[in-house]
Amino acid sequence: MDTLGPAPGAGMTGPVTTGKVAGAPRDPATPAEGAWKRGRGCLLVLALTAAPALAEIGVSLPSGLDVTLHEVLTDDAENGSLFRFRFVAPEIAQAQRSVEELTDDMQHLCQEFALPKLSDLGAEPRQIVVSLSAEITDFGVPTPDVRQVFEAFSVRDDVCIWEPF
């Protein structure tokens, strides 16, 4: 995966990263069909990358938990199919919050935070994965000593629909 955005220390705390998880590499100059064909995917990545306010937003959740957006990742920038919104929630390291309570919070983050941000930028996601982590972790690197919770949501008719793993 490639990280797009300003150099470290340039005031951006949450880069957008793109890359393909599976499949043959493609020439980024030849985008896939759909909205991304007309360059909207490039604009989306630039808009998310260039918006420090988005990366620095703190969000209060229905449970009372406070979280901060760490980064937004996409595995398929050409088609915009999957976006990962990774949030940091230091309280989950000590607080004994139930999985159900955290799932409700992640539903709220998908519906009330991620989906509107992507919609404002013209993205049409098929799936949004929301994660909460007690501290910043590297994506894809096992960190068993850090509590992390993930939920996946499909998107239909501007609604986040929980999808069990």
Image (spheres, rainbow, N blue to C red):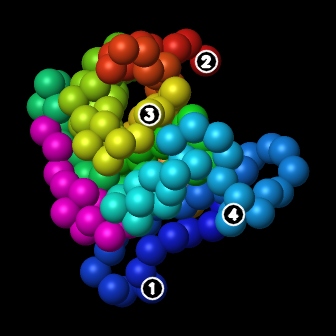
Q: Earlier in the sequence, mark 1 or mark 3?
A: 1
Name the residue carrying label 1: 7
Q: Earlier in the sequence, mark 2 or mark 4?
A: 4
Name the quadrant of the N terminus.
Answer: bottom right
Name the residue carrying label 4: 28
Q: Residue at x 87, y 50 (%)?
A: 24
Name the residue carrying label 2: 165
- The 10 Å Cα crowd at callout 1, few under 14, some 14 to 19, many 20 or more, is few
Secondary structure of residue under mark 3: loop
Residue numbers of the magenta segment:
49-60
Kind of residue sitting beneath label 4: Pro
Q: Earlier in the sequence, mark 2 or mark 1?
A: 1
Q: Earlier in the sequence, mark 4 or mark 1?
A: 1
Secondary structure of residue under mark 1: loop
Kind of residue sitting beneath label 1: Ala
Real-space CA distance between mark 2 and mark 3, rounded to the nearest whole angstrom: 22 Å
Real-space CA distance between mark 2 and mark 1, rounded to the nearest whole angstrom: 35 Å
Residue 7 at x, y = what percent?
45, 85
Kind of residue sitting beneath label 3: Glu
- The 10 Å Cα crowd at callout 4, few under 14, some 14 to 19, many 20 or more, is few
Name the residue carrying label 3: 124
Residue 92 at x, y = what percent?
32, 39
Are the two marked residues, 2 and 1, in contact with CB atoms closer than 8 angstroms? Answer: no
In this rendering, the answer to whether 126 lies above or below 94 is above
**Res 53 visible:** yes
Secondary structure of residue under mark 2: loop
**Is residue 25 within the magenta segment?**
no
Q: Residue at x 80, y 44 (%)?
A: 22
Real-space CA distance between mark 2 and mark 4, rounded to the nearest whole angstrom: 31 Å
Real-space CA distance between mark 4 and mark 1, rounded to the nearest whole angstrom: 21 Å
**Res 98 visible:** no
